[in-house]
Amino acid sequence: MTIENVLLVSGALFAIGAYGAVSRRSLITVIMSLELMFNGVVIAAVGFSRFTPAAELLSGDPVTAEAVRSALTGHVFAIFVTAVAAGEAALAFALVFAMYRATESVEITDASEMKN
Amino acid sequence: MMAIMEVSTLTTIAFWAASAMTLGLAAIVVTQRDVFRAAIALAGSFLGVGILYFILSAEFVGVVQILVYVGAISVLMAFAVMFIKDIASGSRPAQGRLVGATVAVLIFAALAFTAYNTEWSSMDEITDPVAIAALTEGFVEVGTGDDITVLTDLPLDGNALAIENDGVFVDSTGAIGVMLVRKYMLAFELIGLLLVAALIGGLLLMRDPKSTEEPEPTSGGASV
């Protein structure tokens, strides 16, 4: 297990999500694919945190607790991305329901107009 | 010097097993015609990602992943699938699928090429013994948190101000909490604002447009 392996898995998950986002017809499965892409990105962030050193720890200055904590920047990034993705998913489903109520369909080809 | 944070064979096996589970279930999500089955596979894929986080020494992120993705978003997906009747399932005709596959393969090729052709810096470049100990063993943080004392002979006695911590990759939760309220305070507050905005926006979008007028005052107090 190296940083290259982690990035490979991350890239594969992102690519699978991209395939789904382009090729699926139902809006719900498109949103599922977007969530897969989010997860791929977060795996890369956590992998960098685990395998590559923070710049503060390489500078040669005396090590402070702040510098040690910056080794976890990728984890904090992951939590922010997760929060944004959760908000995005909730809002996207609200949009899907609004569209379903207006047009009785969740097909992405029927979504070209959003006016009520 | 001993390599810091070396990876055991067992961990590597677990990593590839969790990766296979994640990617296999993700492939089911994007190919399965039955949308409900796709939602179940998605929950399993999220769980696999959570296991990957635990393997990568990110326990707190793993717990957040399981709570938010496996717990909340998967339920939202299942709810959405059940809410919408005669849900459009299946994929587009072959043309869209071909475009999607081409895009996905190109993205993957670019990412894999970059991953294997870049010389990433390694944890072994850290030479400071205090830093090495603070990452994986124990350290003690005194006072305001800017000074650091590494303890090799635990436990500590005497100094009431001292807080005992594990290395940040042994127990990451406390360090993440400190980062969220110090270095990333503004982003943390903005995330709260974003979630409130998403909540209000979701409620507005979900409101039935037919029920916008005030409800008629019903019986009780109608007689004068």
Image: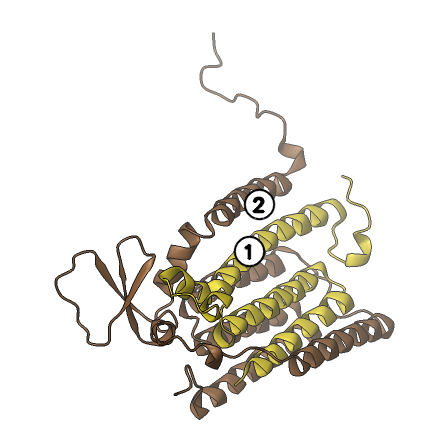
Chain colours: A yellow, B brown
The x and y percentages for residue B102 are 81, 76
Whether residue B33 is visible here, answered yes or no, is: no
Residue at (67, 48) in percent of width and height: A95
The numbered mark at residue B209 is none
Q: Mark 1: give few (<14), some (14-19) or many (20+) Cα within 10 Å.
A: some
Left or right of B161, for residue B210: right
Q: Distance between the residues labelled 1 and 2?
A: 9 Å
Hey, what amino acid is under mark 1? Answer: Ala
Residue B15 in the image: state x and y as whole percent. 50, 84
User: Which numbered disc covers residue B198?
Assistant: 2
Which residue of the protein is positioned furthest toward the top in this rendering?
B224
Which SS class for mark 2?
helix
Considering depth in this image, is A35 or B184 the residue closer to the camera? B184
> Which mark identifies residue A86?
1
Pick the quarter of the image with the N terminus of chain B: bottom left
State which quadrant residue B215 falls in: top right
| A2 up-or-down from A65: above or below | below
Q: Where is residue B55 in the image (x, y as percent from the top left)?
A: 45, 79
Comparing A80 with B141, the one in front is B141
Q: Which chain carries label 1?
A: A
Left or right: A89 with respect to B17? right
Residue B218 x/y as whole percent? 51, 22
Q: Nearer the viewer, residue B123 or B27?
A: B123
Residue name at image x 54 percent, y 72 percent = A48
| Element on which disc 1 rests | helix
* Whether residue B142 is visible: yes
The residue type indicated by label 2 comes to Ala
On whether disc 1 and disc 2 are found on a single subunit, the reply is no
Note whether B161 is above or below A41 in the view shown. above
**Is residue B106 shown above or below A55?**
below
